[in-house]
Image (tube, coloured by chain):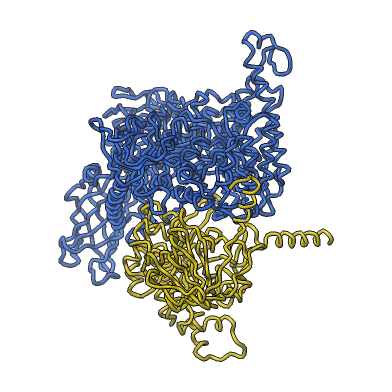
Amino acid sequence: MKHITNTIFLCLMLTSAWAQNPAPGLPQQKAIALMGGTIHTGTGQVIPNGYITFDKGVITGVGDASTVRMNTNEVQVIDVAGRHVYPGLISPASLVGLQEVASVRATIDSREVGVLNPNVRALIAYDSDSEIIPTIRNNGILITQAMPVGGTVSGSSSIMHTDGWNWQDAVLRKDDGIWLNWPGYYARDFDFDTFQSTVKKNDKRDEAIRAVQLVFAEAKAYAEGATLAAANLKFEAMRGLFTGKQNLYVRADYAKDIIEAVRFAKAAGVPKVVIVGAEDSDKVAAFLKENNVPVILSPLHRLPNREDEPVDLPYRLPGILQKAGVTVGLSYAEEWWRTRNLPFLAGTAVGFGVTDREEALKMVTANTAKILGIDGQVGTLETGKQATIVVSKGDILDMRTNVIEQAFIQGRQVNLDDKHKRLYNKFKTKYGQK
Amino acid sequence: MKKQLITGLLLSWAMLTGWAPQTLAQTTFPRNGVYDERPNLYAFTNATIVVDPRTTLQNATLLIRNGRIEAVGNAVSVPAGAVVINLQGKRIYPGLIDLDSDYGMPDLPKRAPGGFNAPPQLESNKKGPYYWNQAIQPETDAGQLFKVVNAKAEELRKLGFGAVLTHAHDGIARGNGTLVTLADDRENTVVLRNGLSQHFSFSKGSSTQNNPNSIMGVVAVLRQAFYDADWYKKTGPGEQANLSLDALSRAAGLPAFFEAGDKFGVLRADRIGDEFGRQFIIRGGGDEYQRIDEIKATGATLILPVSYPQAYDVEDAWDADNVSLAEMKHWEMAPANPAMLAQAGIPFALTSAGLKTRADFMANVRKAIENGLTEAQALEALTTRPAQLIRADDLLGSLAVGKLANFIVTSGNLFAADNVIYENWIRGKQYILANRGIADLRGTYDLNITPQAGAAALKLLITGTNPDKPDYQIMANDTTKLTPKVAIDNNLVSMQVALDKKQPNALTRLTGYRNGSTLQGDGQLASGQVVAWSATLSKPFVSTAATAKTDTAKKTPMGGLLYPFVGMGNAKKPQPQAMLIRNATVWTNEKDGILTTSDVLVTNGKIAQVGKNLTAPTGASVIDGTGKHLTNGIIDEHSHIALFSINEGSQSSTAEVRMADAINPDDVNIYRQLAGGVTSSQLLHGSANAIGGQSALVKLKWGEPADGLLIKGADGFIKFALGENVKQANWGEANRVRFPQTRMGVEQVYMDHFIRAKEYAKAWAEYTAKSEEQRGKSKGKSTTAGTLVAPRRDLELDALAEILNKKRFITCHSYVQSEINMLMHVADSLGFKVNTFTHILEGYKVADKMAKHGVGGSTFSDWWAYKMEVKDAIPYNAALMAREGVTVSINSDDAEMARRLNQEAAKTVEYGGISEEDAWKMVTLNPAKLLHLDSHMGSIRPGKDADLVLWNNHPLSIYARPDYTIIDGAIYYSQTSDEQNRTAMQAERARLIQKMIQAKAGGQTTTRPTARRQRMWHCEDIEGVMAEGENK
């Protein structure tokens, strides 16, 4: 018993030893003007010598710096000449905050047991003290979508800031959508004898789809007035799907699955559907455009799915979809600790066919905001939007110049310290390095 | 009733065996009943006799007595007392021989699926004085295991086989083989020769022992066993009795068969043979045509299957994408494998093993013939060659005097589609497969029924490829087709047919007999009216089989080979060429730094000149580098691409395994890396154990075989590993057995192994220092008959001794500072150096100590948080180490990230402010230094290897991609060639898809497309132990 107590005590000690994330930023006290930087508004516009002003957490003006003069008594002017100013990047379909160390089960809170769990809510488990969080905002990511995984209907996601005292404090939009793992046309089969995996036709697919159809039909009927003696938690969680208040996020990669998933959503009376993953979506780009369905792509930094596929197909996918008129958001999906590389996915997309840097920037800002239904608040640098802004030493999409110097979330200045910088400084000191 | 049944059974048994008595006297056995010894003298006359693949006699006689051939020829006089069998119009062939058989062997014990939940089995569980490894079973004696199983023998007899070499298909060393006939007799007469061959494979079979669990582990175990057998022979059982080594050493001179599985296996098996001066006879997999030059160079004789893949269902355009071009092409080309090998002059025998349905054997041999194999070559591969290979050509293989009377009687050409094998004689005993006595009734007959039933003129058509089972049809007025039901049994004929198509149930029933070429009798119409009938031959049958051969000519042409044989392969291997790259920004990695608007001249695979305004020699191609950046090719210090397996994690030390034995030169990831500017990689063993296997240093020469990828003259490297993987921290509850389970134990593994390696090295040094004469006068325990014996060669200690002797260098997987310190301490105390720490995510905490030890660090740019031991990993690690004087490289450990190593290097600019030039060196010059390749690689300087990449942008930029990737002066990737290859691939896919759809429409069975997903290996992946998708 004593042994156990000691262990627990030790764990607590360790936890407290790590939990040294800096305090969240304080509410904006005074109007701020960022002057002289190159402003990338996220709408495609670039203002070379620009200004941006914000007060009480809201953007009050964006424009050419040479045409304005600031009253330094009323406005705190920050010179960002030579710097680049962007909307805070948005990381959708993410496990950041829900998982900490992959090999330690105790730190994983993303996958609930069961098949149909629309009622489990990712924001509940979002750990605003996760040590991953400061490292991703250090590369410009100020908004993350906490998503549940697992089962067929995984649960409900929420949009979170990467700064905040707790999940209630950090949330930007609660329960923005329900997550559905579409029963695949192909299923992966793994043979432990040969240790080879094959992709085979999924024989259980029809059955699984029927089950999903039934749940959605019943949930819709419930939402439209069926009365139960006691509230059905699962159906309650799905109400918003049928009014367009919530997105239906469907994970599907194979072209046939994408078509079926979209058709299913339509038939089920779900107005807003987002395809997540969409690795084969180059084949159905026209279909997606026709049906006005946006996609959140799997990390582009992956290998082609098939031996004969063009070696750079994953890199080229955003460009192909963009040219077809499909709204594209980029994600780092389940690879939470690599999420800080999200801006570089956009950079890669520029190298492989997206029209230009501003279009690629949209795929981690404006497009994503639109897809997630938060474009009224964030995603672009426009008057009236929230002051969620990053200032980078240079091009934010390139590793060499993505050095985040300042960040504001709803006007609150974010402390950009993180564990990595602290350890860096500690050992620089040890070695007397500058 | 019961009595009747038994009599019936006896009778049918007697009929099956042709009333023949025991063919051969079995004097040692008591007999129940009276003796029935017969002369067993048969003369087969008037036959076409195929004596051997080169000799065919017309109108000849074969005389056999007591199971042996007594005479064969045109002028054989038939002695009195011989049973004469007239084979007018028939042919006789030598009985066929199959060398890869498990006929009569016991079924393999099923291996219980171990995997995750079973604790490891570290030692052999075969009790007795045998080898330490359960998969080495050279003591297995096929002769002792063999049992006659008539049902299986019959299956083979039907195909024309008379004898097989059978062995137990179990284990890496499988023991000896036994040559048996396919007679249904007592084993004493069926076994012809026992122990005339030895057998090996790459499969551990039923062994439940963990080691080996990788292909390189299998090779190591077998090599060690061969060395041990040699040692055992010299030292005798003084030190230990070992029946396995005894058997292995005594079998050394016998023909040795190696089941290699596929083209890679054939080359791998031959390499093992070369080391021990053995030439294996190698059982291939049917894809050898894809590496025909290399396979020819082995000099090996092959045993080839005739199993071919089925066509795929490719009607659905999207589903068809899951079938790779390689699979499609193999479907088309596999039947041509024997012909292509024969044309290349590679000798082989054919086997019926590997067929899903053994009855398809002859049809598939025919497909090989349609694809260009000559009939003589096919026959040779089934008769004389197999007999020679097992040195049994005094018994089998041809119809020469004195050989066994193993032969088959056929209706015609053995390989023709309509051929019928009537009889298979084995050791003079007849097995009837089809009734030779039945006349060939095929032809067109006028059918008359009187009184006439209706007004129609009737014709009976008897057709088909097999005269034994012909097809019947009745034509009314040459227009209406009727299908009668006909039974002809010996002389009796019975036929039912509905003469009026509108009344299918109104059957006319005709019964009668055969009278020469006429059929006749009487019967009843549907009404019950009695009629007489006859069918008179009006036109004899013309075989269509003759046209089977002309199918060859009609065949659509095949696609060409690819190097390697996958979709992204090239039609021709890239060749070095002289080239001048002009006006590029050149990153020299030398003192000159980055040169603007400069030229680089490449000749003979080397960098010839670097400068401005160079002139291109005649014949050199010129590449415009304006606005582009020319750099060295990227060198990935830590890679697991192009490998069939990664971890031989079955023991704490597996220093004996070599990744070179596991190279897969056809892995498309090679090409994908080229597209990312990578030109060389260190293919490392995984991190499952403290001392892993020996690295393979390769250049990514896409299209070359495994041997062609290896960097010649490179130093030897070896993988070590520390931390969670080694102590199996994340392997589940079952894995709590293997030492070590803590970092304390890991240290002791090193201490123990290096102390043993020191002793080993010392023993060898003492031995080699002595002259032959001194060895002869030695005394002590290492002597045999007063001669000092060489120490036992130990492949594991060899590798460790090489480390001590600075001939092999360590790349050690490492994470936390305590263990990094530990290994440097162990190394210092035992007098060796650690060359490189890889991963080294806490290297920044001990960078000063690393610099002092002189060890390099090869790290990830920004990986962390995937397990406990990386919780303190920081992206500033590379910068901190580099500034302390450690040679730092950035590596991938990941097939995907490897193709963006330029981006990963660029992160050191973001994290820690490394200069761009130094950042670039972290993926080029620095890994070259860590791999001891910098004398000829890693920078752009005259004389160095022309491993170059021309980038369309600043190489550290996120927007950069290679326009050209060049290795040793040959262009292995370019954007233009990539596009051309894609177009060519699409066209080839389209052609094959059409062909498959036609094949399906033509009635071929097809299979659903299933995509084989390629594994992306990381250093923690362990075959059979860890699930896919585990994190690093």
Which picture quadrant has residue A121?
A: bottom right
The spot of residue B975 in percent (x, y) is 32, 48
Q: Quadrant of the N terminus of chain B?
A: bottom right
Considering only vertical position in the picture, is A379 above or below B1020?
A: below
Q: In the image, is A112 to the left or to the right of A180? A: right
Q: In the image, is A190 to the left or to the right of B651? A: left
The spot of residue B806 in percent (x, y) is 59, 27
The residue positioned farthest toward the right in the image shown: A2
The spot of residue B208 in percent (x, y) is 63, 44
Nearer-the-camera pick, B470 or B392: B392
Which picture quadrant has residue B294?
A: top left
Give me the chain that's blue: B
Give me the chain that's yellow: A
The spot of residue B429 in percent (x, y) is 44, 34
Q: In the image, is B127 to the left or to the right of A318? A: right
Considering only vertical position in the picture, is B336 above or below A224?
A: above
Nearer-the-camera pick, B915 or B358: B915
Considering only vertical position in the picture, is B928 above or below A384?
A: above
Res B104 seen here: no
Res B996 seen here: yes
Considering only vertical position in the picture, is A201 above or below B777?
A: below
Nearer-the-camera pick, B554 or B392: B554
